[in-house]
Image (spheres, rainbow, N blue to C red):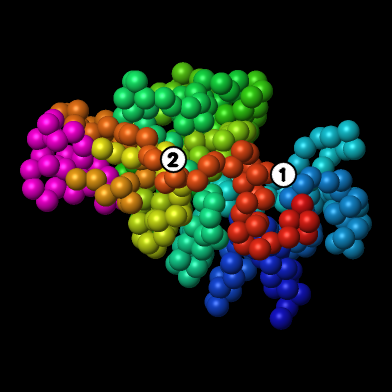
Amino acid sequence: MSETRTVYRQLAQRLDAIPNGFPATESGVELRLLATMFAPEEAKLASVMRLNREPVADIAARAHVDSQEAYRTLKGLIRYRKEERGLCFGLMPFVVGFYEEQLPRMDREMAELMEQYLQETRGAGIARPEPAVHRVIPVEEAIPFDLEIFPHERATELIESAKSWGVRRCICRVQQQLIGKGCDHGIENCLVFAPVEGLFVNDDVTRAITKEEALRILDETEEEGLVHTTGNYRDGLNYICNCCSCCCGILRSVVEFGIPTAIATSHFHAVVDPDLCIGCGDCIERCQFDALSLPGDLCQVDEVRCVGCGACAIICLADALSLERRIEDETPPLPTDIRDWTAQRADRRGIPLSEVL
């Protein structure tokens, strides 16, 4: 095995040791995919990095490279922050992580390698194990006004509580278009936000927008029937993806690869008012998860397939569909934050966190 290939294999193994996962394939396509994202010297450093940020000198020592050389290389990577001990760097997972940062470099080669990787792993690493990487946020309009809804369940609350906002192109739709697939949904509608002002002003990947524009994009994606998703934890959220099952790697894992637990459902499910349903069938095509059917004159909901997004309810002209809160035992409690999620995922995979933190 060549030295370069060895470096990428070491990086792949490091990424798979992170709770998010990055499973190997028989063909080794994951190594070719990493080679489109990392130069060999970057891969060498990344393969010894930890999730927690740390000074350059610590990383350089483990990689057996000069600190100044390591500093210049690490500045080309993506996760760093200025702290009292200087500029500190940490390794990001593959998804959600540095893959989403590849928009400026995404080309046909990378897109094809990503597709091959998804197909060979059948979504593993993104879709397995629990807790899921993403969870569904319900459309608020689909929830009866007298039903309690918590701040972390409201997309508008996440946006309203921020101080800066941005929008990105959906990397999943970009990737699918590059391989000649894709859909007609909008491209620029992945929302990001932060608790500090002006964070996205000079961002090369993110276009800075106002709060009002972020809320408008949210409304537009609901009209398109897209599914709001975000990190599968309660506190510290900073993005909302607006997903479709034809392009999104996570939703594709549910629909295409048959992994229902690839995404955490919202704490709601659709219900039908039999007195109002006119059996028009408009909602059937709207549902991306085949959770609705029309065996007779009334719509029926498969609660197992329903993710509780509410996309069906907002187009029901008869107001026969709405969201109802699931029984508490049907949905596991949300991890508190990303650290809690990481600990739970590590425990489920049997990974000792001390080796990667």
Part of the protein shown in magenta: 272-299
Identify the main secondary structure in magenta: loop
Mark 1 belongs to which amino acid?
A: Arg
Q: At 76% across and 75% down in the image, what residue appears?
A: 3
> In the structure shown, which secondary structural element does the residue marked by tag 1 occupy?
loop
Q: Specify the farthest residue to the bottom.
A: 1
> In the structure shown, which secondary structural element does the residue marked by tag 2 occupy?
helix
Q: Position of residue 110 (x, y in %)?
A: 53, 59
Q: How many marks?
A: 2
* Residue 305 included in the magenta stretch of the image: no
Q: Position of residue 134 (x, y in %)?
A: 50, 46
* Residue 297 included in the magenta stretch of the image: yes
Splitting the image into 4 quarters, where does residue 322 fall? top left
Q: Is residue 196 above or below residue 131?
A: above
Does the CB distance between marks 1 and 2 fall below 8 Å?
Answer: no
Q: Nearer the viewer, mark 1 or mark 2?
A: 2
Q: Is residue 265 above or below residue 235?
A: below
Q: Nearer the viewer, residue 199 or 23?
A: 23
Q: Which residue is mark 1?
A: 79
Q: Which residue is mark 2?
A: 328
Between discs 1 and 2, the one toward the N terminus = 1
Q: At 82% across and 42% down in the image, what residue appears?
A: 88
Q: Is residue 330 above or below residue 350?
A: above
